[in-house]
Amino acid sequence: MKFFAPLRNRANMFTALVMLIFAITPFVAPLIGESFYITVFARIMIWGIAAVSLNLIMGYGGLISFGHAVYLGIGGYTVGILAFHGVDSAWIQWPLAIGISGLVALVFGAISLRTRGVYFIMITLALAQMIFYLAISAERYGSDDGLNILVRSDFGVSFFSLEDKMTMYYTIFAVLVASVLVSWRLVNSRFGMVLRAAKSNDTRVQSIGLATYRYRLTAFVIAGMMCGVAGLLQANLEGFISPDMMNWPRSGELIFMVVLGGMSTLFGPVTGAFVFLMLSEILASWTIHWHIIFGPFLVLIVLFARGGIAGLLTRGTRRE
Amino acid sequence: MSEAPNTSRPEALLEAEGLIKSFGGLIATDNLSLEITRGEIHAVIGPNGAGKTTLVNLLAGMMRPDAGHIRFAGRDITRMSAPARVRAGLARSYQITSIFRDFTVLENVMLPVQAAQGHSYRFWRPVARDASLIDPARALLERVGLGARVDIRAGDLAYGEQRQLEIAISLATGPSFLLLDEPMAGMGQEESQQMIAFLRALKGDYTMLLVEHDMDAVFALADRITVLVYGKVIATGTPDAIRNDPAVRKAYLGEEEIA
């Protein structure tokens, strides 16, 4: 398994291009009079972070979680509920959002990782929907209408305020870069080696003395916390939370972004999120029946482009 | 030099006592007792369906016996998990080649090396530059004759080489005991001969339980042989004793001539 191949193939060049677009958008978008792209790309990057976190367990660990969006919701609701009660400090909101996401992932993982295959998919889905319905029944926090967040997380310093559009944007960008970096180091560490090995041959890993369950659970918790960060960023960016952000179609979309971009590739989830959301944005601007085009497109990708965009672009060169 | 009384044969490294395992109505292991002495190669033979692989699974901890006890190096390990048994020094290889096909040959062995060094909760440092994993893994691959193949994808190895890698993975866990489930399975004449030479070279360093169909290999390697039929031990003894045992001859009648 190759570890890092800087720009050696078209997939990496495509990734670099996407990252470059993310990096310069706040400067370029106003010049071409399309300032709204700043918010669009900020949104895409958040989905990118969530997809990177899912890829950690799904791509590298072989664990197809159909409830991963629940951590978007938990991260978002932690921020939203705290803000609702007047607690705006990022120093309280963020650690709590990440901590609760990790705790929920620990409990959900401990239960679901005892199963395999279709059962794992169904259990992660069921557990996530449990939290979704909990949010729906929380009348105090807006039930299914959701909750407006009036103030963004406050770091208490003058030079760094998320109320500033640029600061918000580049914070998200930095977290995206960090999440890719973390997953790169993780995957190639001793821990990552066990995780990848367990994906390809679980019983063999056990018979060399490693309890795969615990390693998977650890990965599940890390991925949950990372996705929790995406959730807290989403709540901050949109200034709004609702149960819909963790409903099961969101989990399905996350899975699709990962598959579209290229499972178990470092940047695949980021390009996947980019292409998925840009395409739905563009199609939706053409026709309100855009799902009729989008649906078959997704089917074709799954059928004919194994390895996703990363696979398409590296076709012909040796697969890693 | 007198043996201390009351100790139960201190040289027995692995002991199974009254093991029973049934699947539904089928009794795969029927009150089976076995004692394997430190340093010996102990072969287990028997016709198809005699319960040989079940025995390996019970000893390795992949299955729990319905009754009976297993002791390893003086400890009762009957309830111990499979990974814990490996850490205690009891490694197994598989009848059906069980390697990490998409990993390189080197990475296949680095993984058990890191497992032998303790837990793998190290999240940051890349393994690709970790000499404490690479060096022992290379040395071991050199020793099993795969030294020139370290960077090849394991799935691209020739079949015989994959079987060697299979055993190298088990060796890399640093065991004192090897459970070998048909190491010659699917091998040609020449490959089998190489494997026999390979296992003979390991003799003395490891205690081995060898489950095997290839009678040439069994009689070439084994110090003692246990014969299983329908989950029961019908004979245990030296190769010569087994060869002449009437019960064994009867069990194998119509199947194949013993050696």
Image (cartoon, coloured by chain):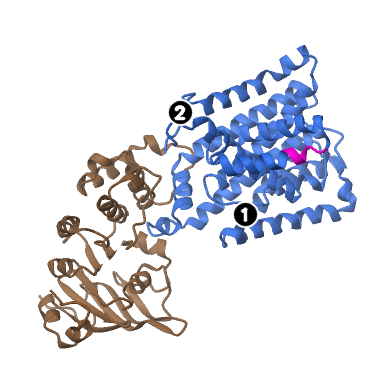
Secondary element under disc 2, as helix, strand or loop, is: loop
Q: In the rendered image of this protein, does residue A25 appear above or below residue A233?
A: above
Residue A158 in the figure: left or right of residue B154: right
Q: Is residue B61 left or right of residue A257?
A: left
Above or below for B35 versus B123: below
Mark 2 or mark 1, which is nearer the start of the sequence?
2
Report the residue marked by disc 2: A5
In the figure, what tint was chain A given?
Answer: blue
Q: Quadrant location of the C terminus of chain B?
A: bottom left
Q: Nearer the viewer, residue B126 or B106?
A: B106
Tell me which amino acid carries mark 1: Leu
Tell me which corner region of the image, top left, top right, bottom left or bottom right, holds residue B133.
top left
Q: Is B112 left or right of A279, judged from the image as shown? A: left
User: Residue A49, percent across and down?
Assistant: 65, 36
Drawn side of residue A51 relative to residue B21, left or right: right
Q: What segment is highlighted magenta in the picture?
A: A289-293
**Is B234 one of the magenta-colored residues?**
no
Which image quadrant is residue A110 in?
A: bottom right
* Residue at the spot 80% in from the left edge and 56% down from the top edge: A133
The residue carrying mark 1 is A106
Q: What is the chain letter for disc 2?
A: A
Q: Report whether residue A218 is seen.
A: yes
Marks 1, 2: nearer the viewer: 2
Please tell me whether residue A292 belongs to the stretch shown in magenta.
yes
